[in-house]
Every structure is written in structure tokens, then in C-alpha cells.
Amino acid sequence: MIIEPKTRGFICLTAHPEGCKSNVLSQINYIKDHPTTNGPKRVLVIGASTGFGLASRITSAYGSNASTIGVYFEKPPSEGRPASPGYYNSAAFEDQAHKDGLYAKSINGDAFSNEIKAQTIKLIKEDLGKIDLLVYSLASPVRQHPVTGEKFKSTLKPIGQTFTNKTVDFHTGEVKDITIEPCTEEEIKNTVAVMGGEDWEFWIDALKEQDVLAEDFKTVAYSYIGPSLTKAVYRDGTIGRAKDHLEATAFKIKDQLKDIKGEAYVSVNKALVTQASSAIPVIPLYISLLYKVMKEEGIHEGCIEQIERLFNQRLYADNMPLDSEGRIRVDDWEMREDIQAKVADLWKIATTETLPEIGDLKGYAKDFFYLFGFDVEGIDYDKDVNEMVSIPGLQ
Ligand code: NAI
Ligand code: NA
């Protein structure tokens, strides 16, 4: 079929298999040029199909020849209806990995459930024995609790005060004010239940109980802090409470891993266009200004550059620099004082009229369509493609 982008609000309903494949291959090529010294060999990635999780899988496989198991939640294709992009990404990754002689298998299902955890652990036992790295990179709007069955929904709201600031609709380029009313206590609790650290800890509990964690095992989950501009709605808002919880969980897990000399970290990553971040109000305007400034300074990075730096200069480096809260920081370039000062100045003058000049709205929109395999160089979008792609290592 001919596949074109079909957008609704901040989501795109279609994805292009050839475009997704090309994106995956570029990330693979980047890592082939930047191998990890003393990298991991047996890796489990939760949230492995897009964004930072996919980049982590690629960095493991191609940076240090790791065997990888990916867990994700993606929609398969049906006749005349393309799959979700993470499905096509995983198909492309596993196909290439197998051609290159790398072990790569995956499980498509709800990582929050006990069933998917059990299925994953069975696969580890059968094929890998143990794992030496778990990357936890889930981003989900909902979670069903595996014990109580309760369903939680996360929200993106300020706490205790109304938030008003600028935002941009990157499809139209219109800059306008957005007002978000404060959340309820219940919404804080629910957001922490979805995006906090409980499920990460459940994974570690299950893996440890089944004795599939190798000596010197490491685990890392991803967090975000961001600028003062988004503080009230992000880090001081409902999602920030979930990130606080995730960060506190790292210390809890570290304690649980003492007997195997294991380590647990949260890495604070840079703001990037992913399916998760395009849904957050205010962030798209911030990102389009940030991209402009960071590109001008020659320090812009995408997911793959971020994760390569995380592995080579933090997780598997001789010395791992941590911040005062014990976190890994690869948002260090984003948070540089000069970068933030420039973005704050541009923010003040950002309007529908000025943004095309002062911001990188084009870069934002391009990255957004890129997530779905569109707007990728070298792809002929008028050509018929087979939407019924399958994932070779899917269990
Ligand atoms: P993403 O939307 O690209 O990836 C989410 C992944 O989770 C996908 O692989 C998806 O299939 C999987 N997933 C979602 N629900 C699932 C479920 N129930 N079961 C199994 N898999 C499921 O998101 P992104 O941006 O890569 O986010 C990953 C982490 O990085 C999140 O914790 C996010 O907060 C964090 N982060 C994101 C930043 C950004 O700007 N995008 C910045 C810093 C941190
Ligand atoms: Na991810």
C-alpha cells in the first residue's frame, strides 16, 4: 500500500516501514562508529521499540555485541492498516541484528503485567542464563496494577497552582497561551503509580527471585528535569512527583542488589522529540527553541547520541560522574547556563510571527514525522510498500 502520514493532534496514526527501517539503520551505523569499551553482553530493555529504549538496545547490540531481549507494547499491522512505528523499528532492528549474527528476541505485551514478566524471565533462562544490564525505558499513559487490578491514568498537571504559559502547535506554528488547572491528590497518586518506580522494582524483584541477574549487574531508568520555564508543569507537577519516586527507587534497588555487587541508576536525559514528549504541553515550544540554540552551538544530540554518551562516558566509564542527588546527567549540555539563558531570552519574544526565525520549528516537525518513518531522506513515499512486516525474533 501507499502509506502517508495521517495526524490527529499530537499523534500520527500511520507509520512507514521503510522510513522506520532507514532510521534504525542510521542509528546502527552511528553506534558501529562509536563502540562501547567494556560494554554489556546480555541486555534486557523494557520499552525497547522507540525513543531512548530503542537507542539503548541498538547501543548494546552494536556497541558491545550484546544479546538483547526487547519488551514493548506495539500494534501489529493488518491488511491495509500499518503497524505502529515501534513495531516496524523492532522488525528492522531484529532483521539486521540476525543478519549480523547477533541474538535479538522480543516480547510484545504489557510490561506492567506479571504474565509478561514471567514470559521474559523464561526466555532469559532458556537463552541467556543471566543478564548484566536492564534498561527501564517505559513511557505509558496508563498502568493496570498487577496485584490489585486497579487501573491508573497519568496526568500532566501543575500541583497547587494554575499554570499559564506559551505553547506551540507545531503543525500550524501557532504560538498561544495555555492554562492548566492544578491537579487533585488522586491525580498525583495515579501519575506516580504509572510513571514512578514501582514497576521497575517489581521487575528487579522478579528477576532477582528467579536468579537471572549476573554478578556486577547494572540497571538504569530514565528521568527528566528541564528548565525553570517548564518547572511548574513538569518537574514540580504530577509527572515530576513520579520522577522523584523513580529516582528514589534507584536507591532502594541498589540496596537490594548489594549481594551481587549490582548497581542501579537514574539517568537524566535531554529533552527530545518522542511520542511521549510531544504530548506534554509547553515542551514542544521549549524544544524548538532549545534545538535552535544547541544546533547553533554544535552540541545538539538525538536519542542515539545521548545513549552512546551515557554508555561510554557514564555507565561503562572508569569514573562515573554523578550529581549531588546521585543521578547520572546526560542533560548536562542542555542545562548549561549559557544555553538556558539563550533559550529564556528567546522564550520572551516567541510569537507565531517570530518563531520561524528564532526557533527550530522545522527541526521539531521533521523529528516528529521521523518518529513515524516519514520525511526520511532516500525513501520514495509514492511507492507501494508491504505493510505486513513481521518481527523475526518476536516470541
Ligand atoms: P517513547 O514513547 O519513545 O517509548 C516508550 C516505550 O515504552 C516504547 O517502546 C513503548 O512500546 C513502551 N511501552 C509503553 N507502554 C508499555 C507497556 N505497557 N508495556 C510494554 N512496553 C510499553 O518514550 P521515550 O521518550 O523514549 O521515554 C522513555 C523514558 O525516557 C521515559 O521514562 C521518559 O520520561 C524518559 N525521558 C524522556 C525524555 C524526552 O524528552 N523524550 C527526556 C528525558 C527522559
Ligand atoms: Na523508549
Image: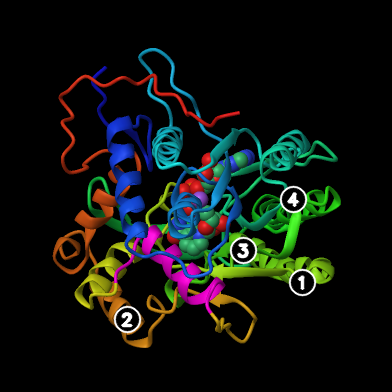
**Callout 2 amino acid:** Ile
Q: Is residue 143 visible?
A: yes
Which labelled disc corresponds to residue 339?
2
Give the residues drawn in magenta, as a range.
300-317
Q: Which residue is mark 3?
A: 220
Ranked by sequence position, the earlier of labels 4 and 2 is 4
Camera-side residue of 44 and 223: 44
Cα separation, mark 3 vs mark 2, equals 27 Å
Asked if 267 appears above or below 361 in the picture, the reply is below
Q: Callout 3 environment at 10 Å: few (<14), some (14 to 19), or many (20+)?
A: many
- Element type at marker 2? helix
Foreground mark, 4 or 1? Answer: 1
Q: Callout 2 environment at 10 Å: few (<14), some (14 to 19), or many (20+)?
A: some
Snapshot quadrant of residue 295: bottom left
Taking the magenta stretch, the answer to whether it contains residue 108 is no
Q: Which residue is mark 1?
A: 261
Camera-side residue of 68 and 160: 68
Cα separation, mark 3 vs mark 1, equals 15 Å
Foreground mark, 4 or 2? Answer: 4
- Element type at marker 4? helix
Cα separation, mark 4 vs mark 3, equals 12 Å
Which labelled disc corresponds to residue 7?
none
Snapshot quadrant of residue 204: bottom right
**Callout 4 amino acid:** Trp
Q: Name the quadrant of the C terminus.
A: top right
Foreground mark, 1 or 2? Answer: 1
Residue 163 in picture, x, y percent from top left: 50, 65
Residue 178 in picture, x, y percent from top left: 41, 57
Q: Which residue is mark 4?
A: 203
**Callout 3 amino acid:** Val
Ranked by sequence position, the earlier of labels 4 and 1 is 4
